[in-house]
Structures are given as structure tokens and as C-alpha cells.
Amino acid sequence: MTDLERLCFGTSTFVAGRLLPGKDSRPGLEALRTALNAGVRTIHSNPHLGTQWAVREVLDEVGPVAGLRHLVKAECPLRGDLEARINTAIEMSTGQLGIARIDAVVLQVDLKRTERAELLNDPKALRDFYRHGSRVAFASGRISAVYAYCHGPAAVRAALREEPITAVAAQYHLASPWPISHLAQISQAGRGFVGMSPLNRGALIDPLARTASSRLRPLAWVLRDPRVETIAITMSSPEHVNEVIDTVRNSQRSRPPVPALAAPGSRRPSCD
């Protein structure tokens, strides 16, 4: 697997949506076209952020893309109405994206709407969340895999104990590097790891740097670890896409070959 194949196009703010309703969408639409033309084949979206319309517009324009995969986020409070929220996320996403099947549902605890904060570190509550969520998602008949979005170490430990969970996702960048201490455990369990927002939503970009590799050095830091199998990054302009791809290619050229870390027969995330 090449580093370019590890890239996942994040869509939370690449065009006008709930978070940025007044944004000019034209650069974001062109960014997705540029990414697809360069070989990016994984797209992560959230049906409640109002940006899936743009993904569909580009895909309708460019036509079938071989190997394209969709990751879709489903959020729910702990001990909330998990079944309704997951089914709604799947129904909305298949409709808004114009697809029949989702490659992976990414289950995330809705931190803001979880009334009892102590549950966020409760092993049983977290395991029940991922177990029940997986059952609901697979029962829809329209998903291929379930990933666990983890807000902290307790969630990682809980997710790894649930057989249907085939990958762990988390914010992973220099300002939030805590998952690094769990990557070996995740790999040894035969699961994949999805590193989200390697540039911390742009906060880690160096605006004074003269080269892409310098501006995006935090991305290169994530790329250096092959245990990060998927890297989800939002790219809102074709210029940013090209900087990301240049950084990816330079990182791959400068890194020596490494042996595979997973044992034969172990599971890998289906989106990679």
C-alpha cells in the first residue's frame, strides 16, 4: 500500500455546510476532483454536517471511480437512542451520497449529548455502545464494516474487545498524540488505525514556511508511522490537495522500507 492510498478525503468543512454556511464551495468541489484524479479513493463524511451534497455533485460529474470507498460517521450519546441514530445516519448518507452501500460506519460517542460524563470512561458502557452499535449497523444490510471512533484510551480498550470492530479512529496530530501509545496494541489485535485531522484543522500548518513539506511537517510526522493505515484530512482547495500529495510522495521517498507489522491472517480496515 502506498502512502497516497492511505489518504482519506475529509468533508466536514470543504464546502458550505452546517459548520461554514457562507463558505464559497467552488474551491472545495475542485479540491475533491483534484484528489480523485490524483488517486485518493476514500472519502469520510458526516450526514449531519450538510456537505454530502458536494460529494455527490462531484461524483455525478466525474462518473464511476474504481475502488472508491465511503466512511460515514454515526454519532450517538452513550445510552441514547442508538438504533434510531445509526439507521438515520445510514439512510441519510445513502440518499445524499447516491450510493447503495457504505463501506464503513464510524461509531462515535456524542460527547456533548452524553448526560453522565462519568460514563465516558466506563468500560462496560463503552463496550455496550460499540457492541450494540455494530449489531444495528450490520442489521441494516447496507454496510460492510464498523469502525470505532475513540475519544480516549478507555474507548480504545473497549473497542478492541468487541469482535465486530475492525478499526479504531481518533484525532491524531502533534497537539493530540495520545493514540501513539496504543498503536502497537491496535496492530497486535489485527485492527487498523485511522488518524483523523493530522493538521488539527489547519492549526498546525506553518503559514511562514516556503515549501509544502515545511508547511505540512505535522502531516509528514503522521505519515512516518505505517501503523497509521488511513489518514483523514480535509482539503478545501486544489492547492492544498497538491501540497498534501507532494508531502505524501516526499515522505514515501524518504522513508526506508519497513516490514509488515500485522501477523498473517490478521484483519485490516476494509477502506484502505
Image: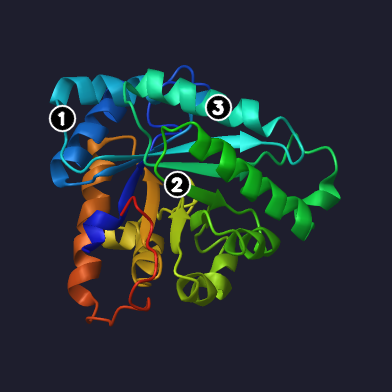
Q: Position of residue 189 (x, y in %)?
A: 50, 72
Against 70, residue 253 (above or below) is: below
Could you classify mark 1 by the number of other residues whose Cα lies within 10 Å: few (under 14), some (14-19), or many (20 or more)?
A: few
Q: Which residue is mark 2?
A: 202
Mark 2 → mark 1, Cα distance in angstroms: 31 Å
Q: Which residue is mark 3?
A: 87
Q: Which mark is residue 64?
A: 1
For the N terminus, the quadrant is bottom left
Task: Tell me the colour scheme of the image.
Answer: rainbow
Mark 2 residue element = loop
Q: Position of residue 69 (x, y in %)?
A: 30, 41
Q: Earlier in the sequence, mark 2 or mark 3?
A: 3
Mark 1 residue element = loop
Residue 159 visible in the displayed image: yes
Query: Does residue 195 appear to the left or right of 265 in the view shown?
Result: right
Q: Which mark is residue 181?
A: none
Q: Position of residue 54 (x, y in %)?
A: 33, 22
Quadrant of the rendered image containing residue 23: top left
Against 2, residue 53 (above or below) is: above
Could you classify mark 3 by the number of other residues whose Cα lies within 10 Å: few (under 14), some (14-19), or many (20 or more)?
A: some
Q: What residue is shown at x 38% (from left), y 57% (from top)?
A: 269
Query: Does residue 29 appear to the left or right of 121 in the view shown?
Result: left
Q: What residue is shown at x 23% (from left), y 82% (from top)?
A: 256
Q: Position of residue 62 (x, y in %)?
A: 14, 26
